[in-house]
Amino acid sequence: QVRLEQSGAELKEPGASVRISCTTSGYTFTSYLVHWVRQAPGQGLQWLGRVGCLGGDTHYSQRFQGRISITRDTSTATVYMELSSLTSDDTAIYYCARERGLDFHFEFWGQGTLVTVSS
Amino acid sequence: EIVLTQSPGTLSLSPGERATLSCGASQTVNSNSLTWYQQMPGQAPRLLIYATSTRATGIPDRFSGSGSGTDFTLTISRLEPEDFAVYYCQHYGDSMFTFGQGTRLEIK
């Protein structure tokens, strides 16, 4: 079955960077896109960006442009999201989610990774 | 950037009742890119409806979606206890994904 398994919770100081992984299984990795969506405590969902798992092409929300990087490793079917210059506003649960290209929706999601930014 | 506004913010109903959740867009959107998710506490969102009205795999037929242009609706025909959750609409356009702020469906 399709699975997206994310790395564990992170505690970071303001100004630091965080790197979260999303290891996929149960499907052909290079046939899909993987997106990152976050949810601040008690808040709604916010899209950060995505990577095409075949060619590694990326597209980011303008709100995060310049401090986000999404990469993929086809040998391990894993996608990574790195967010830099963290502030307390970045405290959130971060989800990876799979999209088949041009579907415009996310059928499968990871379990989420809590990132806490605090001094 | 298209803004999605969901109403009501909170909907209080009893099991067995019909629920109607709305999602309004600030501009006309492509119906193929309007999606609904359900989120239970402490869980990731779950895909319910995509392309405005297509149920995702395994979603019961009491869930239905409709709409066009700027107005979209998620209807739950007869509420089951497990349907009480937060619901989000989502749209893709202008090379980005946007979500509504959510409707909390609570037991009356």
Image: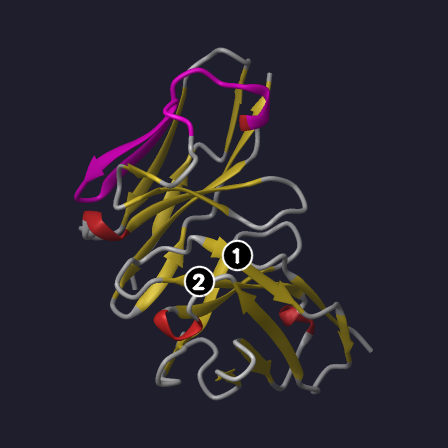
Residue B75 counted in the magenta span:
yes
Name the side, left or right, on which B49 lies relative to B78. left
Respond whether the residues carrying marks 1 and 2 are from the same subunit: yes
Query: Mark 1–mark 2 contact, CB under 8 Å?
Result: yes
Vertical placement of residue A20 versus B2, above or below: below
Residue at 58% x, 82% y: name it.
Answer: A82
Residue at 69% x, 87% y: name it.
Answer: A15
Total of numbered circles in the picture?
2
Mark 2 crowd level (few <14, some 14–19, many ≥20, 10 Å Cα) = many
Classify the position of the N terminus of chain B by image quarter. Answer: bottom left
Classify the position of the C terminus of chain B by image quarter. Answer: top right
Which of the two discs, 1 and 2, labels the residue nearer the N terminus?
Answer: 2
Residue A109's label in the rendered image is 1
Q: Which residues are magenta?
A: B60-82
Chain of the residue that carries numbered disc 2 in the rendered image: A
Residue at 75% x, 68% y: name it.
Answer: A9
Residue that badge 2 annotates? A98
Residue A48: give x, y in percent of width and height.
47, 71
Residue B13: give x, y in percent of width and height.
52, 17
Name the side, left or right, on which B84 lies relative to A10. left
- Measure how far apart labels 1 and 2 are at the Cα level: 6 Å
Instruction: Give the structural element (helix, strand or loop) at label 2.
Output: strand
